Each structure stands twice: as C-alpha cells, then as structure tokens.
Image: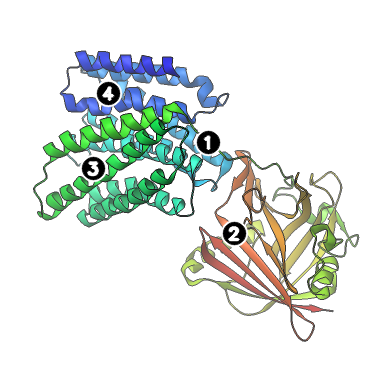
Amino acid sequence: MRKFVLIHFLLFMIIAVFSKEPWPFLLLTVAQIVYVPIALRFVMKRGDWFSSFYSYFAIPAYISIAIIQLFSPEWSAIPAIIYLAFTVIIALYGLTRFLRRGFTNIEEFSIDLGMMYIALGGGWYFAYIADIDTGFTPLLTWLTGIHFHYSALLLPIFIGLLGRLYKPNFYSFFTGLLLAAPMVVAIGITFSRWIELFSVLLYIVGLAGLIAIAWRTRFPTRMQKWLIVTSFTSLGLTIVFSLLYVLGNGFGLTSITIDFMLRFHGVLNCIVFALFGIVGWALCVPSSVYEEPNFPISRVKGKQRIEHLGDPGKHRGLVDNMNLYGINKVSPRILDFYENTIDYRLFSTVHWHAWFKPFAFLYSFISRRTEQINLPLHRNEVEMTGDILTIYDGIDGRKDVRAWIRKVDEQYAFVALYSSHQTNEGRNFMNIALPLPCSTMTGVLEMIEHGDDLQLTSRKTCPDSDAGIYLTTKLGKYFSLPLEEDFVVREEGDGSLTARHEMWIFSIPFLTIHYRIHKE
C-alpha cells in the first residue's frame, strides 16, 4: 500500500509542477490521480475481477489525465474518454458487488453506490474537456465533475468504512440522506433552486448525524480517530458555506461568490476532508462484516411445470412435524394445519395498499404469465384451492421438498416449494422457494411462538439469522431483496384459524392478506 500511495502522490506532484492549467483545476486532478485510486484500494477484494485487471484499466486512465494536464492537446477529448471508460468500469465493479449481496449491510451499499456515482463524475469531466454544451457554463460543468468525485465517491466510501466499525440504529437513516443528496444536488442545479436548497439541507442533517457517529466510534488508534473525525467535521463547516452560497446565488440573501467557494470550500474539501480522510483510513482499513449466506437454494425455475416434478398424496402438510422448529406450545389446531394442510379450506381477502395499487395493476400483467403471486386486485373474499405435491428427489436440490399449489378461480396464485434448513448453530428455518422466470425467490422464515399464536417472519431476530427474502439468478445466489413478510396465525373461539400476512418493501407496507382457515 505504501508503495502504491507514493507512486500516485509522485505522479500528482509532477503534474502539479508542470501543469498548464490554473491551480483550481488541480482540485479535481488530485482526486483523479491520488484520492480515488487509494480509496478504491481500501475496498477492492483481492482475487476478484476488478483487482485482477485493475492495472490494465487504471494505468491508461491516469496517463490520460497527465496528458491533458501537462500538454492540453487539441485532441484532449481522446484521453478524456479513456478516463470516462475507466470510471464506467469502476461503476460496473460497484454494481457487481451490489448484485452479489443485495439490499443488506447498508455500509457496503454506500461503498457500492459511491463507485457507481463516479461514472457520472467521469461523464461531466469528459463533457468539460470535450467542450460539450451541457446547458451550463464550462465552470459549472467542471464543478459538477468535482462534486461526483468528492461528495459522491469519497464521502460514500468513508461512510461505508465508518459503518464497518460502528453502525448504531440511526446510521442507516443518516447514510440514506447522504447517499440521496448527490443526485438531489444535480437535479436542483438543473431544475430548481428550491431543490438545490433542499439537497444542501439533506447534507447538513446527514453530516450532523455522521459526525456524531464518528465521535462515538472506537478506532484502533487515537491518530486514526483524530484524522477521521477532523475529516467528517470539516464537511460540516463547508456545507454551511454551501448553504450560504445557495441562499446568495438563488435567493440573493448572502454575498458568497463562486470565487470564494472555489478557494475556501474547494481547498478545505481537498486538503482537510479528502487528505485527512485518506490518510486516516489508510492507517487501518476495517474489514467488511458481511458474510454470504450458505443455506440451500432450490434449483427449480419458473419455466418448469410443478405438476410434472412430483406426486400428490405422499405428504399431507407443509411440515411433517413442527417439533423440527421447536414449536410445541402453540394451539394444537395450528400444529395440525401445518402438519395436515390438505385437510383445510383457505379463504383469503387481499388488500393492496392504496399507494401500491398502480404498481399492483401493472404487475398483474406479469403475474398472469409467471403464475406467481398472482393475486386479485379487488378486496372480495375468495377461496384458494390447490394441492400438495412431493417433489421428486434430486430435482430441487434441497431435502424433503413439497410444493403447495394455491389457485383462485383455477388460476395459479402461488406455487411455493417448502423445505427447511439448519444452521451450524442448530437453528432451523423454513425455506420456501417461489420459482420465477430464470430465477428463484427464496423466503427464509423464522418461527416464533407467542402464547397460542404462531408467527413466521423474514425479519432477522439476531445478526446471524438467515431470515430474509432472497433472489437467485446467474448474477448472484443470495441477492437480498428489500422485502419483508410476516405471518401471524391464531385459533379463534369456534376452532377455526385466522392468519394475517403482511408484506413491506423498503419498510413500507404494500400488501396485507387476511385468511380464514377451516378444517373440512
């Protein structure tokens, strides 16, 4: 790492000494030549495709920047497009990291999104060098390129590294604000002064929270804590002047000029935020706490007809014995329903939440073809009929698999393949696969007893829980979806059962299904 850092600093010093451009343009150059490469080193995983071919991508890009700065040739657009291609490759690396993991571990998502943002920085830089009319002045085009190198790449990576060390409950909220802010800034500059003002307020709230978290974080050394806390705190100062600039430029309330912002805001961000942050994290780079799950995944995909993959009658229920999950205190009727499911009639009332109904309508055109999660749009009670099939051994890849087919008016509503798996710690989870075209969605549910009631939930009750909803494709085996589901089953006074099935997307409720369950 030290040799790598020395080479990049030396290259920048050569460019700085012999550059033909005015000094403010070195604020972007130092990010391109020094800060971005070192920040990428913090998060690259040895042995993956990006680290293996990094030199082939990076060296031409860095040479291209040097050519532009040292010689300013008339054909500068050619080396600029080489650098743009490099930023696109970085963005693809961020995307592939995200696709392997999905919507989990927001600190890693922050790093991924920062790498994806850098392609926008490369695009704006190319537009400036190639003298493309973006609708803004050349200076503003160049400043937007700076924005996507510092605020949109370095800051998300620093936030992610901080989250690896310490991630309190409110970390996700403040991180979310700061991840959204770069795009809101770009939209505000383009369309509305009010949106631009709102974006600065997002930065202020998000940075205030991150600075507080940084102060409370335990770092390996005092020197590292001092450097990193200073780095984050400096942003708190510069964002205040950004607010004053927006109020002056957009509303005429202050007299902060673009020249002052270049000298104060630019230099402070370049030296204190970026340099202190890079040096601080280089002292000790925290490792990712994310560990890929290893539970079994169904091999059955949506194109296969379930009726051809199994026999009816061998299994009467979704579970042979609920003791497998340590469930023995709930109502005996609930145990009987799961162990003898075919003896029960199921009546459902579907409630799509108002905000989601337009999406549910559009999705209905897809669900009729996929025959999966194909639910009515109305709220009338309907009966779900169907059967339980035992899947032939070796087809699914999991153990003791049975398919529960549910239909509404002879149309498939759900085709769910039920199994279970046990973790190394001896915890058992219900493992439910929903075959989709070229993919499989897997719901891993934990069973929890609440007196006589039974709850099945995809929400994690502890950090090492497998619970969740995952999508398996050729791009990734355990892509964690931003979905959560929760079933609560209870026995009523007349001996019948009721169940409430709730689903959330990004923690927002979008679907509720009420069931009445009667034994035939």
In the drawing, does residue 492 fall left or right of residue 380? right
Residue at x 53% of width, y 59% of height = 505
Sequence order check, earlier mark of 1 and 2: 1
Residue 79 in the figure: left or right of residue 468: left
Q: Nearer the viewer, mark 1 or mark 4?
A: 1
**Label 4 or label 2, whichever comes before in sequence order:** 4
- Is label 3 or label 1 in front? 3
Q: Which three-letter amino acid code belongs to the residue tagged 4?
A: Ala
Q: Residue at x 78, y 76 (%)?
A: 345
Q: Nearer the viewer, residue 138 or 270?
A: 270
Q: Position of residue 308 (x, y in %)?
A: 82, 53
Q: Amino acid at mark 2?
A: Glu
470 over 9 or under it: above or below: below
The alpha-carbon separation of the residues under discs 1 and 4 comes to 28 Å
Q: Quadrant of residue 32?
A: top left
State the residue position of label 1: 96
Front disc: 1 or 2: 2
Which residue type does callout 1 highlight? Thr
Say which label, 2 or 3, has the lower sequence index: 3
The amino acid beneath tag 3 is Thr
Among all residues in the image, which is located at the extreme front?
Answer: 222
Report the Cα–Cα distance between label 3 and label 1. 33 Å
Please give the residue where the numbered disc 2 appears in the rendered image.
484
Element at label 2? strand
Identify residue for label 4.
Answer: 77
Q: Which mark is residue 238?
A: 3
In this view, 202 is above or below 71:
below
